[in-house]
Image (cartoon, helix red, strand yellow):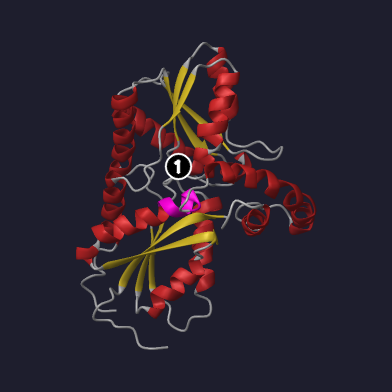
Amino acid sequence: MPEPNRESTPEVAVLLVNLGTPSAPTSSAVRRYLGQFLSDRRVIDYPRWLWLPLLYGVILRVRPRRSARAYAKIWTPQGSPLLANSQALANKLASELVGAKIQVALGMTYGEPAIGDAIHNLLADGVRRVLLLPLFPQYSATSTAAGFDAVFAALRGERRIPEIRSIADYHADVGYIEALASAVEKYWFTHGRGERLLLSFHGIPERYVNAGDPYGDQCLETARRLRERLGISETELVVAFQSRVGRERWLAPYTEETLAQLAHSGVRHVQALCPGFAVDCLETLEEIAIRGREEFLTAGGQRLDYIPALNAADAHVRLLANLIRRHVQGWADAAP
């Protein structure tokens, strides 16, 4: 392998970590992706003797076809929305950080581009210090820790391990709350204001929270800070949790039930925001913007608007750049 050109390549890098996506909206591609995702103990912690036969004998025979149809509804000419939006964010962030001499890379915990490939490419470029920035504002072992696991698994065979720093969460960061508030206010200015602002976070099993996962509390803290920044009442802002699977109790209230309850109580116009998703993906574009709207209208509501994720918005780029600059302090001035 040729020696990297260290005169032109920054020795400090930030690795943006996102969950992942199938490579195509097909049953076979979704099956490969779900097989990797759902076999991770961080995601499903049931005993392997119980879970793996169920996963490979039942779930991966049935769910990929249904999920592929959902992905097909939101697939773009650029491919997966999650990947396209993550890459656009990484590109803008790289431009923002040019003066700081920080390289930006993107890796997925499951699927492509894999975290392992991103790490090996950085090392081949001569990077000696890596900041891990999971694109999950609220920490959970099911997402953030799973990404960290993938990073350290990729480093097992390396002779020279880079210095590693990590950002566990930014759920209460002032820049993050301001970026969310700005997105909501811009939407209100253009489209008017609904009767309720629904904050829908991805759910996790309640048992995980009881075991020490701080995710639920961090979601509620994000919601509280955003409500205070927007200056709206506790009645006007509603928090719920989506994407529940199986029979086990998850964080509640559940989004689909909340939408039905709002409609039944006479609320006609709901606007939904998903603060836990840094970029738009299946869970926001299909589960909320399409299915959530259908569920609300079926229950008697009249209008549900989805407020897009921060994606590659300037405010999002600035808040991430500021986080990165704070966490790499001291690295730029010290020899590796």
Residue in the picture at 53% in, 80% down:
157
Q: Nearer the viewer, residue 70 or 275?
A: 70
Residue 33 location, quadrant: bottom right
In this picture, residue 114 sits left or right of residue 55: left
Quadrant in which the C terminus appears:
bottom left
Question: Most extreme residue toward the bottom, as rendered?
Answer: 2
Residue at disc 1, secondary structure: loop
- Identify residue type, mark 1: Gly
Q: Position of residue 262 (x, y in %)?
A: 53, 18
Which quadrant of the structure image shows residue 118? bottom left
Residue 121 quadrant: bottom left
Q: Which residues are magenta?
A: 79-85
Q: Position of residue 79 (x, y in %)?
A: 49, 53
**What residue appears at the point 45 percent right and 44 percent down from the top-left corner?**
280
- Specify whether 111 is left or right of 173: right
Residue 205 lies within the magenta run:
no
